[in-house]
Image (tube, grey):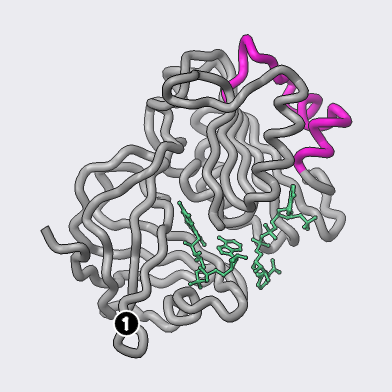
């Protein structure tokens, strides 16, 4: 099997100066919500590929990728030039363990993302699994500026469908905005604000926590939760904290 399939860009949505979603037609083997695939472009004769989470749930016609154009990023600078009809290389097989099947049974599911780390959670939340497996589902989404809280319409639709089970808690760290928490996730766990807003508490008995995005957030949040009695979830040593670092 070839390492890459050639896909076609169907839509390029720009949310802000640096945030984009690409909708791509390509053949991907069946995957689990929460997984990622590598996508690539040929740049100066070399194939440059990076992993990206699938934002769409399994079974969608198009693959959806949500990315931020990072300063001097070799791939993202070029992704941003893509237009409908352009070709893009997509690996045929998805990978990754940020999936619900890796989580032991529990009552409460917490999904906490910084920036583009929201992508895999939107994929998972579009499936039936979280809603049949957990009594409560809390989505925490932390960005620097309110304009970076993408996918609000999709989150509102989830809320409309699952209002008794679902809490959405946005954080905006670099400006004061009504109806959002300020500051960072770990501090809001330490001072009790996050649990107060969710109306449930973290506990080893009842919580499963998924973390995705900035590796420093993943580390700092894990440490705060470990101090609360939770532990990392490993396949051969089940626990409560399942993570994916984006860099
Ligand atoms: C498993 C996995 C899944 C990923 N999924 C996504 C995704 O869905 N969307 C996405 O935008 N990125 C995702 N990434 C990061 C992505 O693979 C690239 O690293 C990123 O798009 C930048 O590519 P680049 O070639 O332009 O720059 P790179 O040379 O790869 O990165 C340059 C620097 O940019 C910063 N950076 C990289 N990614 C991000 C990010 N997402 N948010 C903020 N800063 C970042 C880091 O400081 C990094 O060192 C994922 C990474 C991993 C490991
Ligand atoms: N966001 C922008 O305006 C912008 C624009 C163009 C390019 N970029 C580039 O994109 C990258 C950053 O993208 P991003 O804004 O999505 O990601 P980010 O830097 O990871 O910030 C996203 C959120 O994570 C928080 N965070 C950072 N470190 C944390 C930690 N240790 N614990 C808990 N929370 C933490 C941030 O809070 P703090 O605000 O407190 O750090 C912010 O609320 C950089 O390469 C940047 O240069 C960003």
Residue 19, above or below 65: below
Name which residue lies at 69% across and 63% down: 147
Q: Which residues are magenta?
A: 185-208
Q: Circle 1 is placed at which residue position?
A: 46
In the rendering, at what x and y percent does residue 106 appear? 53, 14
Of residue 207 and residue 224, the one placed in the foreground of this image is: 224
Residue at the extreme left of the image, as rendered: 1
In the rendering, at what x and y percent does residue 1 appear? 11, 58
The answer to which image quadrant residue 225 occupies is top right
In the picture, measured across the screen, residue 3 lies left or right of residue 182, that is: left
Name which residue lies at 81% across and 25% down: 196
Residue at the extreme bottom of the image, as rendered: 44
Name which residue lies at 39% across and 42% down: 96
The answer to which image quadrant residue 169 occupies is top right
Q: Quadrant of the C terminus?
A: bottom right
In the rendering, at what x and y percent does residue 84 appear? 32, 77
Name which residue lies at 54% across and 15% down: 135
Of residue 226 and residue 137, the one placed in the foreground of this image is: 226
Residue 27, above or below 184: below
The answer to which image quadrant residue 102 occupies is top left
Of residue 6 and residue 240, the one placed in the foreground of this image is: 240
> Can residue 116 be spotted in the picture?
yes
In the rendering, at what x and y percent does residue 140 appear? 65, 39
């Amino acid at each position: 099997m070839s390492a890459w399939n050639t896909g076609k860009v169907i839509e390029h949505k720009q949310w802000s100066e640096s945030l984009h979603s690409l909708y791509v037609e390509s053949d991907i083997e069946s995957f689990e919500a929460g997984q990622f695939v590598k996508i690539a472009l040929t740049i100066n004769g070399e194939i440059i590929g990076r992993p990206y989470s699938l934002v769409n749930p399994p079974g969608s016609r198009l693959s959806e990728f949500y990315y931020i154009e990072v300063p001097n990023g070799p791939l993202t600078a070029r992704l941003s030039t893509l237009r409908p009809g352009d070709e893009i290389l997509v690996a045929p097989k998805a990978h990754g363990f940020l999936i619900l099947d890796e989580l032991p049974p529990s009552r409460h599911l917490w999904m906490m993302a910084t920036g583009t780390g929201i992508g895999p959670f939107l994929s998972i939340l579009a499936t039936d699994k979280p809603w049949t497996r957990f009594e409560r589902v809390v989505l925490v989404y932390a960005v620097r500026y309110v304009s970076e809280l993408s996918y609000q319409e999709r989150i509102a639709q989830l809320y409309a469908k699952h209002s008794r089970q679902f809490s959405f808690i946005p954080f905006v760290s670099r400006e004061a905005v009504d109806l959002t928490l300020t500051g960072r996730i770990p501090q809001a766990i330490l001072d009790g604000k996050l649990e107060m807003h969710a109306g449930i508490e973290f506990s080893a008995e009842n919580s499963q926590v998924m973390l995705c995005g900035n590796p420093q957030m993943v580390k700092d949040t894990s440490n705060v939760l470990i101090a609360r009695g939770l532990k990392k979830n490993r396949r051969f040593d089940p626990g409560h904290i399942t993570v994916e670092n984006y860099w």
